[in-house]
Every structure is written in C-alpha cells, then in structure tokens.
Image (tube, rainbow, N blue to C red):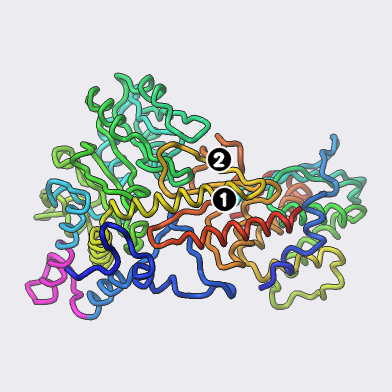
Amino acid sequence: MRAHAQVTGGELATSAIRADFPILDQDVNGHALAYLDNAASSQRPRQVIDAVADYYRHDHANVHRGVHQLSQRATEAFEGARSKLRAFINAASDREIIWTRGTTESINLVAQAWARPRLGPGDEILISLMEHHANIVPWQMVCEQTGARLVVTPIDERGQLRMDEFERLLNSRTRLVAMGHVSNALGTINPVRDIISLARARDVPVLLDGAQAVPHMAVDVRELDCDFYAFSGHKMCGPTGIGILYGRESLLEEMPPWQGGGDMILAVSFDGTVYNDLPWKFEAGTPNIAGAIGMGAAAEYLQALGMESVAAREAELLEHATGVLSQVPGLRIIGTADAKAAVVSFVLEGVHPHDIGTIVDAEGIAVRTGHHCAMPVMDFFKVPATARASYAFYNTEEETERLAAALRKAREMFA
Amino acid sequence: MDLKDLYRDVIVDHNRSPRNFREIDPPRRVADGYNPLCGDKLRVYLRLDGDTIEDVAFEGSGCAISVASASLMTEILKGKSEAEALDLFERMHGLLTGAEGSRDDLQSFGKLAALSGVREYPTRVKCASLCWHTMKSALTDGGSVTTE
C-alpha cells in the first residue's frame, strides 16, 4: 500500500487530499469551485479514476466466462473488488456482498426477493418519516402487491426518530424494519444499534439504508448485527451506477433470484434451470465491471485515510458550519439532532431555496436545493424545500465562510 | 453570468409585493400548477366576461422567478381576449428560452421582457413558465399542471 501524505497521526491533511481530487481544482462562474453537494454525489480521487481507466486500457473482457487471459484478469479484478467491499464493511463472507446498481436497486431487491414472497395482509413493514424516497416507494409497491401495510415511525421537531413511538409500533405484525442509517435531508444519525436490538428481540429482520452513512463513518455490519445493508458507490467517492447489497447469508440463501439471465445460473435447459450460488444468484447479466473495480478502489482509498479520521474531520466541518451559518440573519437550520453527519439543511427568511441555489452558484458554490427526495420530511417541517450544504472530508472551513457570505448577499438582494 | 440579469429590479419588486395575489370568487376558472422539483405551487384564477379576461389573480408559493412571473402575468392579461392570452402563452416560450425563430423583439413584451434573463439559466425556465402553463390550463380545460 502506498505511503499516505494524506493522513498523519490520524489527522487528515486537507491540501494533500484535495490534490487527489482533480475536479475540485477548477473555477465555476469565475470563482474557485466549492463543492458542498456531497450528499447528492461525492467526487472521485484520481486513484478511483485511474483504476477505472486502467481496467479499460489493459484488462477489460467479460467476467466469469473466458479461459483467456483478459477474462481472467477482469474476473480477478471484479471479484477482488467484492472482497475489498466485504472488508470495508467487515462482512463475514464474499457470498454476502451482492453488486447492484446502487442503494435503490439494493432495497428493491430485498423488497421483491425477500419481502414479496413472505408478506401478506395483516403484515407490517416499519420505516420512518425521514426516509429517502428509495426507502419508501419499494415498500409501498410491495404493500400493494401483498396487502401488507407500511407503518411510519414519526420524528421530533429536531429531526430525531421518536424511539418511544418506534417501540410502540414494533409489534407482532411487524415483519421487517427498514431504516435509514443517516438521513440525507437532515443529517440525523439514527440510533441503529437500539433499533436493531429491539427488532432482534422480536425476531424481526432489519434493513439499513446506509447510502449516507458508509461514506462518513466506520460501518461494521457484523458488529451492527443487521440483516441487510444497502449503499452506493457514487456517494463514497466511487463510480455511479454501482452499489452493494449486504445480506446475511442465511437470508440470502432462502431468497429466490429476482432477475433471470446469464451469470445467475449454473445450468439452463427447457426442463428446468439450476441457479448459481451466492452471490451470483442475484447478479443476472454482465455486471458493471468497471464500476465495481472503481468502487473497490474507493473503499481502499477511504480505508487508507481511515474512517475514524474521516468522521473526525467531518465533525469539525459540521461544528464550524453550524456555528457560522447560524450567524446568518434569517437562517434557520432544519434538522438539529444531537447525533448528526455533516449535513446542514436550511431555509433563509425571504429567499426561496431555489433562488439561494442560483445565487450561491454564481459564486462558484454548489449546494442542493429542493425536497432532497424526502418529501414527507419537507411536509413535517412545513417547508416546500430547503437548501442543503453537505460535506465530505475534502471540504474546508473557508468554503463555509464563502457560503455564509453569499447567503448574506442573497438576503440583501431580496430585502 | 451576472445575477442582475436574472434578478432585475422588476423581478425583485414583484416577488416582494406580488400584484393580484388573491383569490377570485366564483364564477371563475381556476387551475393549479406544481413544480415538484423545487416545490413551487401556484393557483391561477380567471374571470371572463364573454371572451374578455375581466380579472386574473393568483395564490401560492415559490421562488422569486415563479412569483414575479405570475405577478407580471396577471398585470398583462387583464382586459385581453382568450385568443390574445393564448397567443401570448406561445410567445412567452420564445421569450424565456430564446428559441430560434421567436418572432418578437423584447420591446413587444413590455414589462414581461424582464424575465428574458432566465434564458441564461436553463434550470430556471420552468420557474418562469409555470404560471403560464397554469393559466392556459384554467383557460382551456381547468385542471392541474405539473412541470418537472
């Protein structure tokens, strides 16, 4: 493994890290880019870009097929990436690591291959009000298909899960708990250990939507003892269109395949088909090989930095941003949980979020504005939309200062 | 890009104090417009006297561009015929997108020309056009409009 100028004594060296991310070194609208939209998608270090490019330059062929040299190299790189992701979340076996197109597909896979055959009228799936649409709609679809009911755990005014309500709603009809590990719209880190232990006590399996957690903190699926864990490559410095479903092996074994085709079979005849073993049983068709290799490189990059160091640096950025943005007249932060990832969702009196987005973009600052694919959260806080600054370990305090200055300017413009 | 081209004084003024921001009692025509991307929600009311738009008003919430555009629209439509309103709807498309072949010069739009700055901001064109689509819906069929 290479030497890391990027981290010394557990502390991240921001300038060395930023040098790894070529995209950050550019001007937007005449200003240095300040990329504060990491919850929507993070950027990629050259190590990931190079891994993908090198694969296409030197090693590409289809996987699991040929005896020729390139196919063997591609297969080794693809399966090697699976092992890297297994290590990254400390799963017990590569058999528990399924490649998908992303968090959304991972959740849909569980909805269709685990929940749909098992659920019926009277059964309940328990989620929360702060879920991303990706952890709402697949369950609504399964409920329509099976007659099961979707039950929603409420949140409090600070955007925290109401654990008293969760305990009450978790009952003998509950067949699955599906919760976000970290809220994309509010930044809330949910008490997933408590959620899992309460559910386990009732033998209810738990799926965690980890899209916003895996890039920002150490995640250990065995220590968590969750049953399914879904996350995406592109939010953790990897490529788009690739993600992971972790599933406990015993559950995955019981599940039927959800898509049919090549690669997911051992033998096909018109008398009947024998499905492949885990994990390939769930990977029909030629996979996103380059995406998987890139995501493997991203996991390696983050591991080299150390997820504890990443989390510590982002906690500093969050504390600074919360302080600085709170000083902007008329600004209200939406989502003030005790445990938060580095996400600051806010509204500004007299300036619509959509206008904020345009005004700060003119200063080279990228923030997300809108409902963040979490419309029920917007309804709860009675706002049509928010603006959201979301951080990664490569961001700087100076970028927040620039955002605050641009927001003051926006207020003056509309005053 | 200069933000002042987008947020001209007329726009800022109409956002701060929208004109005809009220309900019209029945008999009326009404339609809802919704942009789920940014959460803009508008309700446009029309009252016709024969073929003439006797009164037009709107309610709702949205960004400065959508509110100012609706406010400006209500000012200009009062007293116009249905056909004139629908013709203006078509011409607005050219104004907002700067599309080739739009047959108007900016002068002919009067105050509405202040909205021409959105051409440089493709993500904001729908903010400015939402009220016009909603007005058209109220005029022709009465229903709800969604732009994404």
Identify the secondary structure beneath mark 2: helix
Image-quadrant location for residue B132: bottom right
Left or right for A83, reference A193: left
Picture coordinates of residue A55, whole percent (x, y): 22, 74
Picture coordinates of residue B124, whole percent (x, y): 65, 61
Residue A126 drawn above or below residue A363: above
Image-quadrant location for residue A234: bottom left
Q: Which mark is residue A241?
A: none
The part of the chain drawn in magenta is A58-79
What residue is pinned by disc 2?
A: A378
Residue A275 visible in this rendered orientation of the protein:
no
Q: Mark 1: give few (<14), some (14-19) or many (20+) Cα within 10 Å.
A: many
In the picture as drawn, the residue positioned furthest to the front comes out as A9
- The amino acid beneath tag 2 is Met
* B39 in the magenta segment: no
Left or right for A318, reference A115: right
What residue is pinned by disc 1?
A: A325
The residue positioned 36% from the left and 28% from the top of the image is: A148
The residue positioned 26% from the left and 56% from the top of the image is: A306
- The amino acid beneath tag 1 is Leu
Tell me, yes or no, whether dots 2 and 1 are on the same chain: yes
The residue positioned 38% from the left and 58% from the top of the image is: A393
Q: Chain of mark 2?
A: A
The residue positioned 34% from the left and 47% from the top of the image is: A213
Q: Earlier in the sequence, mark 2 or mark 1?
A: 1
Q: Chain of mark 1?
A: A
Identify the secondary structure beneath mark 1: helix
